[in-house]
Image (cartoon, rainbow, N blue to C red):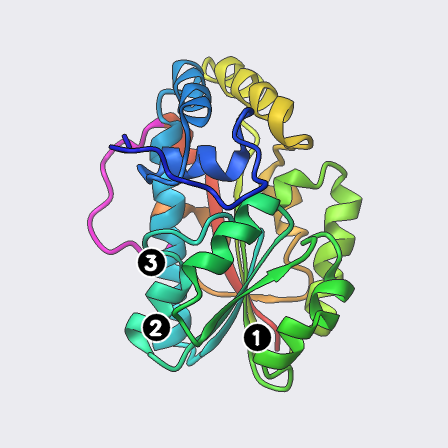
Amino acid sequence: MAEHEWQPPTGVDTSSPNLARVYDSLLGGKDNFEVDRELHRQLEQLVPEIGDVARENRKWLGRAVRWLVRVAGVDQFLDLGSGLPTTQNTHEIAQAVDPDSIVVYVDNDPTVIAHGRVLLDDNDRSFFCPGDLADPAAVFDHPVVKEHLDLDRPIGLLHGLTLHHIAELERAQQVMVGYVERLPVGSYVAMSNIGRPAEDSPEAGRVFEGVERLREIAGGFTLRSHDELATLLPGLEPVEPGLAVASDWWPEGPRPDRLPYALTLLVAGVARKA
């Protein structure tokens, strides 16, 4: 884990676990504290593969962003509920392919906002926008978004492990309709979620217990079926292989014969607004 305690910006609470910092710990990052690492360890006791899920989601995000830049020609991104913009995040991935790519990160976590601005201070094509991902109108109307993204050209909209924080399916659907309506034609939505395990699965109990523990610090955390997740890409044309296990979305190497159970629940897809 980290060799030294990361020093947060003034005013950031370090006495309680923070979801963004816990996720950073799961990724093997250093921008976290012992209180975050303790929750990390508790979650691993319930779901030993939870770190694998976090890392696989980050790998999928990388593949999706590279595909969007190289194949679809997208050069501007809106990354919603982005968390801490640490190693191999969207701006690093996109700008490694096309240095002119622009990335706007959106989050409403004070820790993320404060630290994100510091991390991006020396990158003149990456920006941080304080905002609530559940309010698409406010996001698109924010001065940071309006100044740095060209809303008349295609945008890559990224929802990586975010929509489970909106508890009600109907509300999540409304949020996504709000984003899709505002996206220019030719834009893409990339989305990943943790799917709901079958109730009769012998593994389901520990997954649900882990989710309950996450709810204690993050509020709403809703697992959804594949059919429910498909409704969160309204009116969009799916890119092959559609909404699939994340490990199967444009893999960069052979897939193991048997994935760890928790990785089979990580569902992801990319779809285009025609």
- Residue at image point 33% right, 34% down: 52
Mark closer to the chain start, 2 or 3:
2
Element under label 2?
A: helix
Which residues are the magenta region?
A: 249-260
Residue toward you, 137 or 69: 137
How many discs mark residues in the rendered view? 3
Mark closer to the chain start, 3 or 1:
1
Location of residue 20 with respect to 40 vertically, above or below: below
Q: Which of the 4 quarters of the picture holds residue 261?
A: top left
Residue 95 — which label?
2
**Real-space CA distance between mark 3 and mark 1, rounded to the nearest whole angstrom:** 19 Å
- Residue at image point 50% right, 59% down: 117
Crowd band around label 2 with a 10 angstrom C-alpha radius: few (<14), some (14–19), many (20+) = some
Identify the residue position indicated by label 1 in the image.
187
Residue 250 — which label?
3
User: Given the image, on which type of amino acid does mark 3 rest?
Assistant: Trp
Q: Is residue 265 shown to the viewer in this render?
A: no
What residue occupies the far left of the structure in this picture? Answer: 254
- Residue at image point 74% right, 42% down: 169
